[in-house]
Amino acid sequence: MIGSAGANVGKTTLACALIKKFGKTTDITGIKVTTIKTKDGQCPRGGQGCGGCSSLDGDFHITEETDSDSEKDTARLLAAGAKRVFWLRVIKKRLEVGLTTLLDMIGPDTVSICESNSLRQVAEPGLFLMVESRSLKTWKSSARNVKEYADRIIVAGTSGFDFDLDRIKLTDRKWTLQEKATAIIMAGGGSRRMGIDKSMLLIKDKPIIKHICDQLSGTFSQILISTDDVEKYAFLGLDCIPDKIPGQGPLMGIASALEASANELNFVVACDIPHIDLRLVRKMLAEAQAADMVIPTSGNKKYEPLFAVYCKSSLEAINEALSSGARKIIDAFAECRVKYIKLKTKQLTNLNTMEEYEEFRQKYDAQV
């Protein structure tokens, strides 16, 4: 889904560029959504308008574009290589009904690129990009309402976009945004409360650690496993990084993996966190531009250092803490620029006991 901060900032240009890039190997359906507040004859963009909205009969109307030669946005999508293109005009309060009808028409497995701001309030796409221009001073209301959901805000200028489109991937018919960052999965814990190795517990016949890797794949340019048992995790086909000095806890594991990482930005996650909120992770990575660490907090200032972002710039402080005999991750905070972000309720799930594992597994099985 592609939204825009205002009119004529390059939303359709971006949509066309992505269709040209991926449409050669995958059939892509283009969708344009025009949301109408009321059927009062007024154009939602102001001015006299084209009459397309005021002529709406009913709560919504879906039209398929067949002419690729005009200057209409839908025609541009078709000319760019979209297999089919649809225009959904819909009363704002009936957005969900209009979308459901459209999805029934095109099929649930269709790969699509949709232009809309308001639709993001009723649907969660695989990827939500927003476009703005450097000259734009004020965002329109529909854009402000969904800005917080954007996976990336892309700035359009006279020379193009301030973003490398090669970072957008279409893998197994799913859209992902690849970060220039490393994901480090911590698999060196003793699993004392669980009683058995948490990383190898099964979720849908797949070890939790593989379940986590699959979620991170495509989003990160590198994935590392922090572990002293390299052979155990060889089946993942990823680089396993042993601790430089064994037996010194997760702080040593983080330090060793940071040294091996190919990127400045690093997302560290424990192997007992089975669901990764990638939108939250992207926001944490963005916050790290002005920090050495981004540490989530929950409850009464409870830190979550094993679902956090560490820049390589934090490595000196971490090594100094280790040299002084410190073993807790929080012992390195004092010498770093730390950005704390507050988690929403139930935004992060840890599996520490068999009861928690069974509860998550049953919920996951019911959803899939």
Image: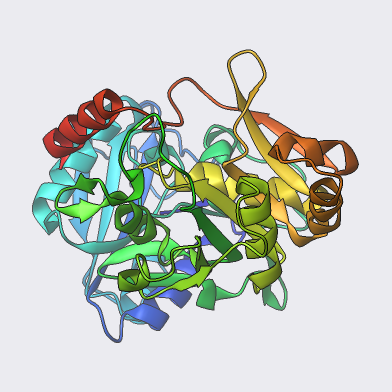
Along the line of sight, the residue nearer the viewer: 40 or 134: 134
Name the image quarter holding residue 229: bottom left
* Residue 248: % across, % down: 65, 49
Residue 327 position by quadrant: top right
In the picture, measured across the screen, residue 105 lies left or right of residue 209, that is left
For residue 185, above or below residue 330 = below
Please state the horizontal and vertical placement of residue 6, each as a whole percent of the image. Answer: 61, 48
Front residue of 30 and 170? 170
Which residue reaches farthest bottom? 24
Using the image as rendered, state which of residue 146 and residue 290 is in the foreground. Answer: 290
Residue 131 makes an appearance in the image: no
Going by the picture, which residue comes out furthest to the top?
Answer: 300
Tell me residue 100's x, y (percent): 17, 40
Q: Residue at x 57, y 37 (%)?
A: 148
Q: As displayed, is residue 232 above or below residue 98?
A: below
For residue 109, which quarter of the picture?
Answer: bottom left
- The quarter of the image holding the C terminus is top left
Is residue 259 in view from this perspective?
A: yes
Image colouring: rainbow
Q: Quadrant of the N terminus?
A: bottom left
Q: Residue at x 20, y 49 (%)?
A: 62
On screen, residue 296 versus residue 84, left or right, reads: right
Please provide percent x and percent y for residue 160. 66, 75
The image shows a total of numbered marks equal to 0
Q: Residue at x 36, y 75 (%)?
A: 237
| Residue at 41% over, 40% down | 273
